[in-house]
Image: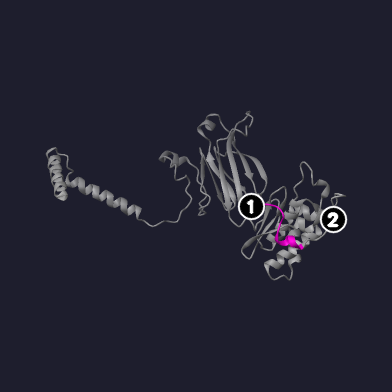
Amino acid sequence: MKKLIVLLIGVYALFYLSQKDMLPSIAQIKSLLNLNLENSQLTEQPNQEVIIPSQPETNQPTATEQKIEPSVPASTVGNYQPTKIQTYQVTVVNGKLVITGKATPYGEFNKADGVILYIQEARADKKATIKVPFTNGKIDYEYPLHYSVGDVIINVDEYYKGIADDPDKVLGYAKYHLTDGDPFLLPSFMIQSNDPAITALAQNITNGKQTDTDKSRAIFEWVAKNIAYNAPLVNAANPPTYSAVQTYQTRNVLCTGYAHLSAALHRAVGIKAKVAYGENHAWNEIMLNGVWRSEDPTFGSGYINANTRKFVRSYQPAYFSKTDKHKEGEYPW
């Protein structure tokens, strides 16, 4: 019964619409069907290889803008899509920051001389301020990055004759998280695992060792037995932070020096290494047999005498696989 009532209502509705000339024509129905068919064919196309465009896909310029926008070198690295900063564009290609563009309308009106770039590389601990003059009102500049992993931030602004630069006033910025490699196997400004002295030492320490565990134990033992703790600085208000190279050269450091040198030696022989911290202390986490394990070469090297406050060498092999501190985080290098 319900079906019959619905059918009668439908027939009446069609009759009413036809009397009011509100039904679509056959030509309109065909046109609608053709349009839907074309749309379905477009959505069913297979995924194509993505080539980085000269403009971000989310903000396509008009045809007039496309004629005057600078081009960016083609790249198939999908991780680093270009960032549009007004009339400029930034991307990462082959280990370089690539900045292209032309003066903004404001820059053209005020006869800007070029752009000023503020570049920060966290893993390299580098901050650069670079002025790039225009060539015929445009720039096409490449900045070689120090490392292929880590965060990179660039602020872009224009500069003018007779006007002081204001680093707090910028046209915009771009941020990239570089992932071209394993950060726990690559060097950084604190963990110089590619330094010739470090690589030579690492090869010498691990010579003849067959497994990563044996190599790691040999590195731990060398660092613990050959590096001394700089006891007078233990309670310093602003204690120094020692890099791997500084630790190797001075042999008298705080916990950061132990951890950075140990990490550098591990990475130099292809073993993943982190520097962890917690409770005002730093140590290592080493990847062995697929598991991150704590190693604390500082505590493995000895202790501070409670009476004399001097460092006492006393090798503690148990700290090859533990630390006494609770982890709070990891350093980004």
Classify residue 162 as left or right of residue 249: left
Color theme of the render: one colour
**Disc 1 crowd, CA 10 A, few/some/many (<14, 14-19, 20+):** many
Residue 322 in percent (x, y) is at 70, 59
Q: Residue 266 versus residue 127: which sits nearer the camera?
A: 266
**Measured along the vertical axis of the image, is residue 43 above or below residue 290?**
above
**Disc 2 crowd, CA 10 A, few/some/many (<14, 14-19, 20+):** some
Classify residue 96 as left or right of residue 30: right
Q: CA distance from mark 1 to mark 2?
A: 38 Å
Residue in view at x 48 percent, y 50 percent: 52
Residue in view at x 60 percent, y 47 percent: 151
Q: Residue 216 versus residue 157: which sits nearer the camera?
A: 216
> Can residue 193 be seen here?
no
- Per the rendered image, the range of residues in magenta is 317-327
Residue 209 in percent (x, y) is at 72, 70
The magenta stretch spans residue 31:
no
Q: Circle 1 — which element? A: loop
